[in-house]
Amino acid sequence: DTAVSQTPKYLVTQMGNDKSIKCEQNLGHDTMYWYKQDSKKFLKIMFSYNNKELIINETVPNRFSPKSPDKAHLNLHINSLELGDSAVYFCASSQDRGTGAQYFGPGTRLLVL
Amino acid sequence: AQTVTQSQPEMSVQEAETVTLSCTYDTSESDYYLFWYKQPPSRQMILVIRQEAYKQQNATENRFSVNFQKAAKSFSLKISDSQLGDAAMYFCAYRSGPRGANSKLTFGKGITLSVRP
């Protein structure tokens, strides 16, 4: 069974479009995260939710909006996609806010043309 | 703000030999966690090992072990009996401890490890 899953795994789209990436975890964790990995492989936090409450919101354009319908799901919606949004987006989860390792999904490779 | 530095962009090791990957970090906190993650070409991020800062004993997971030097803010990963499947990018990461409100991982730039048969 997949612990943290993301859909889709690949996403190719045109500039200006709106797209969503979905994430689900079946580990029973109460904290979920979105990270962005750029073309140089650098990983940076974007958002974090704990029990559906937003607890981390890094300096991210407001075109990016996370949504957590329940603690097992954290989706990422991106409006008006730009070339610079091309990256790999990882979802992760952990047991609670302050302790425990984070477990990652397989990543979604987004390519904006 | 915490920073994590991996100064070696690439390393190579002969199969069956031992290799050490370096990581240093900067923080003013006393309670935190450190991790090593592996990212093979499949791009999956795989947790290799974790270390709690309050524990003096170095963590070990099978062929993987760490050398945690809290005063020097150093956290190196040793891979023994290297295997071809160990070839990947390795990331060192920092996380604030339980009393910190910020649970995000701060990553180093990563190091690409190749294994020669």
Image (spheres, coloured by chain):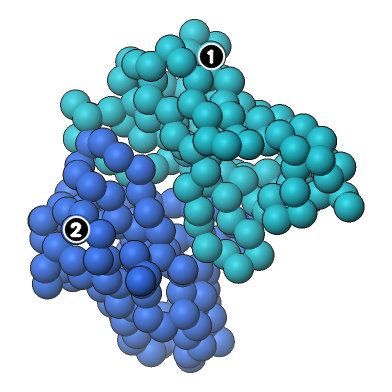
Chain colours: A blue, B cyan
- Which quarter shows the N terminus of chain A? bottom left
The structure residue drawn at horizontal position 77% and vertical position 54%, both measured from the top left corner, is B84
The structure residue drawn at horizontal position 38% and vertical position 89%, both measured from the top left corner, is A17
Percent position of residue A20, x then y: 32, 81
Q: Residues within 10 Å of mark 2 (few under 14, many from 20)?
A: few
Residue B69 image label: 1
User: Foreground: A5 or B29?
Assistant: A5
Residue A28 image label: 2
The structure residue drawn at horizontal position 55% and vertical position 87%, both measured from the top left corner, is A113
Chain letter behind tag 2 = A
Q: Quadrant of residue B72?
A: top right
Residue at mark 2 to residue at mark 1: CA–CA distance: 33 Å
The structure residue drawn at horizontal position 26% and vertical position 36%, both measured from the top left corner, is A99
Q: Is residue B99 left or right of residue B93?
A: left
Please say whether residue A1 is visible from this viewpoint. Answer: yes
Q: Secondary structure at mark 2?
A: loop
Residue B95 higher or lower than B66, as above or below: below
Residue type, numbered disc 2: Gly
